Amino acid sequence: MGLFSRATPTPLHDVDLVLADLDGVVYAGSGAIPHAVDSLTRAASDRRLAYITNNASRRDSVVAGHLSDLGLPTQPDEVVTSPQAAMRLLRDRVPAGSKVLVVGGDGLVYELEKAGFVATRSADDAPAAVVQGFAPEVGWTQLAEAAYALATPEDKGGIPWIATNTDWTIPQGRGIAPGNGTLVSAVHTAVGRLATVAGKPERPIFDEAVARFGAKHPLFIGDRLDTDIAGAQSAGIASALVLTGIDRPKHVLAAPKNSHPTFILGDLRELHEPYPATTVRGDITTVGGASVQIDGVDVRIVAEGDRPIDLVRAGAAAIWGTGRAIYGFRVPERLYADPFHRP
């Protein structure tokens, strides 16, 4: 399932379920990313389309409504959220009906109560666990309540702490903003303990999605190597990294082995284009019209080709193929030029 093990007619060949991340893939803020709606609509014409999101601030029905408003008709059960994955973990750790301290928004409270727990915002209510997810309104007061509730380490009798995700950043219409990982880190700094993570890159959210739709050959599309692609790889799912969100060409070139995507896309139109084969002859790697040479510690561009995305693909294939870390090379700036759209 490696990126360069075989060529396929398109990334959608033999795929029976497309799972798309949302922020940075379908939309940034409230607006759709160019080409996303048309490309996903076309993909859904002969296979299932569903969504996985680490964003815990909204209910699945609200997310489905947003997608429908953008032109992607979606039912709530076609949205798999990190709060839903968090409830899977919580059920294994505390009795049904327990009070749980919530750091987050309506989406997290909704899933908590649907799962049979009682939400509280105060550590004084002796909660049986803390569940933390992103919401724009999360501030010092909620973070402080979590710290009070988590003062005792779990191995010394303290309560469980589950984070929906640890994404450091989140793309918004105005740019890149702090994500839930930043807020989880604030609590970690205060209490000196780590949260158990439910969403990407952990498996529960992927396993829930594959089981829900009975998929045999799913493809997951994301914009982050460390959560989306690493998570899909750990779950045994083919993946496509699209350069319309967080991670850029320079991150792709430097990606560790556990974050190598099956496909690299400039935007979602390329889901429907033949994916070029990678050829290696001696020390030269070629994708489409782009060729890159590894010469000791130097990475050289032999031919740029006429498609920037193929140059990124060729550079990634060449560097990854050595099994060496990026800092062991001298890489020309042109190789990680970034003409691709992002918020």
Image: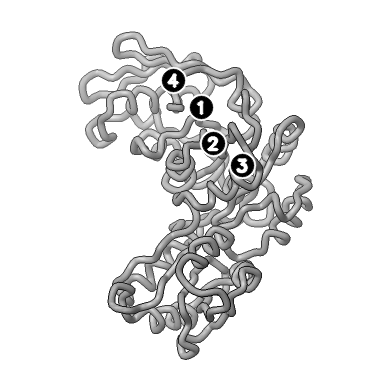
Task: Name which residue lies at 69% across and 57% down.
Answer: 63
- In front of the other: label 3 or label 2? 3
The three-letter code of the residue at mark 3 reads Leu
Q: Where residue 254 sits in the image (x, y, percent)?
A: 34, 37
Question: Which residue bears the numbered disc 4?
Answer: 5
Question: Which residue bears the numbered disc 2?
Answer: 340
Query: Could you classify mark 2 by the number of other residues whose Cα lies within 10 Å: few (under 14), some (14-19), or many (20 or more)?
Result: some
Residue 19: mark in rendering: 3
Q: Where residue 128 sits in the image (x, y, percent)?
A: 46, 79
Query: Could you classify mark 1 by the number of other residues whose Cα lies within 10 Å: few (under 14), some (14-19), or many (20 or more)?
Result: many
Query: Considering only vertical position in the picture, is 134 above or below 140?
Result: above
Q: Say if mark 2 contacts mark 1, CB within 8 Å.
A: yes
Marks 1 and 4 sit apart, C-alpha to C-alpha, by 18 Å
Q: Considering the numbered disc 1 on the image, is that residue within a helix, a strand or a loop?
A: helix
- In front of the other: label 2 or label 4? 4
The three-letter code of the residue at mark 4 reads Ser
Q: Tally the numbered discs.
A: 4
Residue 71 in view in this figure: yes
Q: Say if mark 2 contacts mark 4, CB within 8 Å.
A: no
N-term mark: 1 or 4: 4
**Residue furthest top in the image:** 281
Residue 309: mark in rendering: 1
Marks 2 and 4 sit apart, C-alpha to C-alpha, by 25 Å
N-term mark: 3 or 2: 3
- In front of the other: label 1 or label 3? 3
